[in-house]
Image (cartoon, rainbow, N blue to C red):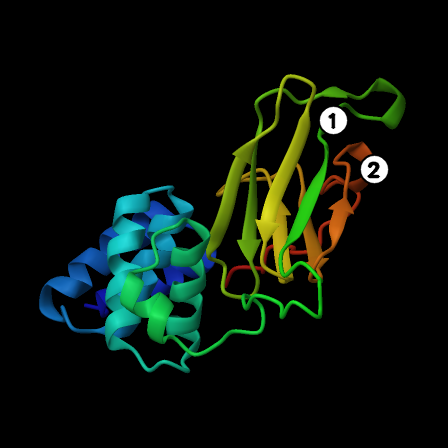
Amino acid sequence: MRDPGALAAEALERGEYANAADLYRSALASEPESLPLRYGLGVAASHLDRRADAVREFTWVLQRGEPDSTEVKTARRWLLSVGALPRFAAATAPEDPREREQKPADQKPVHASLQGHALSGDSAGAAAPMERMQLILYDYPNRVVYFRIRTDEAGRYRFPKVPPGIYKLTDRASGPPRWRLRVELGAGQDMSLDLGPENSTKVRDDFPDRPQG
């Protein structure tokens, strides 16, 4: 029988987040002190919008992992993005250039924002606003969910106070998405990006699925 931890990692890579979470929990029953397993469960939970589970696992990683490791840095950024960063971590963590406050002389905002309209239809001329549609902004390449919002009645969306970096913007946590776009945000940038037929996955897909097998 294969190791459930390895099966969990494969399920996570395929985007099978509910299955991955179950497998990670099974693996943790015999290895409760495994940082990779805790981190993997946190990632799966973030995709499933299970905030309490993700906060618990990422906090565990933050408290026990190596400060300079990718897992700890990613866990810290996710906890910061949802307002759940423990006080000790905020006070003692090494400075991250993607999060630090600018010195008064710089006067440049540290965060970025992303906004636009989401429109449906087969062509730009026939597009209609996508009301109350979920949009998700993933940190790349760590694949952790940082922001999850819904469009308003006019199809408008806005992600405020996003740390500078590279992200994947999509409308689906699993299954075929309408959009899957690479977005790179700089400090202080206010980017406008409309979502419509012209940049849907039928025309442009910045993160195509890997062939199985």
Number of callouts: 2
Q: Nearer the viewer, mark 2 or mark 1?
A: 1
The residue shown at (36%, 80%) is 67
Q: Which residue is mark 2?
A: 198
Residue 179 image position (x, y, % from top left): 67, 41
Q: Image height check: is 23 above or below 195?
A: below
Q: Is residue 159 left or right of residue 14?
A: right
CB of mark 2 within 8 Å of CB of mark 1?
no
Q: Image height check: is 143 above or below 176?
A: below
In the depicted view, which residue is nearer to us: 9 or 90? Answer: 90
The residue shown at (69%, 50%) is 181
Give amino acid for label 2.
Answer: Glu
Residue 145 image position (x, y, % from top left): 47, 51
The tag earlier along the polypeptide, 2 or 1, is: 1
Q: Which residue is mark 1?
A: 119
Q: Is residue 120 visible?
A: yes
The residue shown at (68%, 24%) is 155
In the depicted view, which residue is nearer to us: 2 or 96? Answer: 96
Give amino acid for label 1.
Answer: Leu
Looking at the rendered image, the quarter that the N terminus falls into is: bottom left
